[in-house]
Amino acid sequence: MNLLLYGAPGSGKGTQANMLRSRFGIPHIATGDMLRAEIQAGTPLGRQAQPILAKGQYVPDDIMIGMIRNRLHKPDAGGGFIIDGFPRTVPQAEALDVLMGELGRSLDRVLYLKVEMAELLERLSGRLVCPACQRTYPPGTTACAADGTALVQREDDNVEAVKPRIEIYLSKTVPVLEHYRGTGIVSEIDGRGTIDEITGRVLNAIGENGRFNSMSFLP
Ligand code: AP5
Ligand code: MG
């Protein structure tokens, strides 16, 4: 099952990807998490990326395309994957098409988590993350349920960075959805409601046994 999670910052991509990874045993490939791991490790890429992420801008396409190419060639991605945070620009989407062709694979479904702007801003301002495993939690949580690590706020979850993150999403990433619209693989999922309700909609969109249900578009 080759899945792509699409949605604005704070729409719940990471939250739903964790569920899909546990349920289907396929890797969660999140470019934001990969960049934050590079920053934490102090690599040359991490040093280059840190100020870009802190300001809510995008890392250059050539770097991101190289990163996803390397990751998708790893053996654990051979049985399927959940991509989260890529492609974020039309050139990245075109590069992913080429890469899928090289790998002899195709995307089975693009899961678009649709959430209103006011809700996105509220979620991002309250979000907490585990610095060890990158799982995300709503406000009020203190420790990671998986490993007990004390939760922290992400460096880009502040007013100065959230505004440019939303703006760049609207200008550069909304056109990516148009790139996939004509392919018939987009499921538009109402991202309002509890996490469990949205999980139910995601599973319905991909089908219990990995068989893909016809799209249920929002009105
Ligand atoms: P990335 O890490 O991908 O950030 P993002 O796209 O801004 O998305 P988020 O991780 O903020 O949100 P999410 O949709 O995962 O929501 P979550 O599940 O956490 O990228 C970070 C940066 O890296 C980018 O800004 C860019 O600089 C760079 N980058 C990455 N990829 C790149 C690329 N391809 N090209 C260029 N640059 C790139 O949920 C949010 C919160 O809401 C959590 O607290 C959660 O608990 C809560 N929540 C979830 N669901 C619900 C619900 N149903 N009800 C209430 N609360 C909920
Ligand atoms: Mg995320």
Image (tube, rainbow, N blue to C red):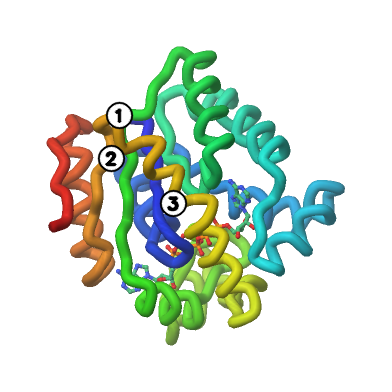
Identify the amino acid type marked 1. Thr
Residue of label 1: 183
In terms of depth relative to the viewer, which is nearer, 81 or 133?
81
In terms of depth relative to the viewer, which is nearer, 172 or 37?
172
Q: Marks 2/1: CA distance?
A: 8 Å
Indicate which disc residue 6 carries.
none
Give the quadrant of residue 12: bottom left
Q: Is residue 11 left or right of residue 87?
A: left
Indicate which disc residue 174 carries.
3
Identify the amino acid type marked 3. Val
Give the quadrant of residue 215: top left
Q: Is residue 170 left or right of residue 189?
A: right
Q: Earlier in the sequence, mark 2 or mark 3?
A: 3
Q: Position of residue 165 (x, y in %)?
A: 57, 65
Image quadrant in which the C terminus is located: bottom left
Residue of label 2: 186
Q: Residue at x 45, y 13 (%)?
A: 104
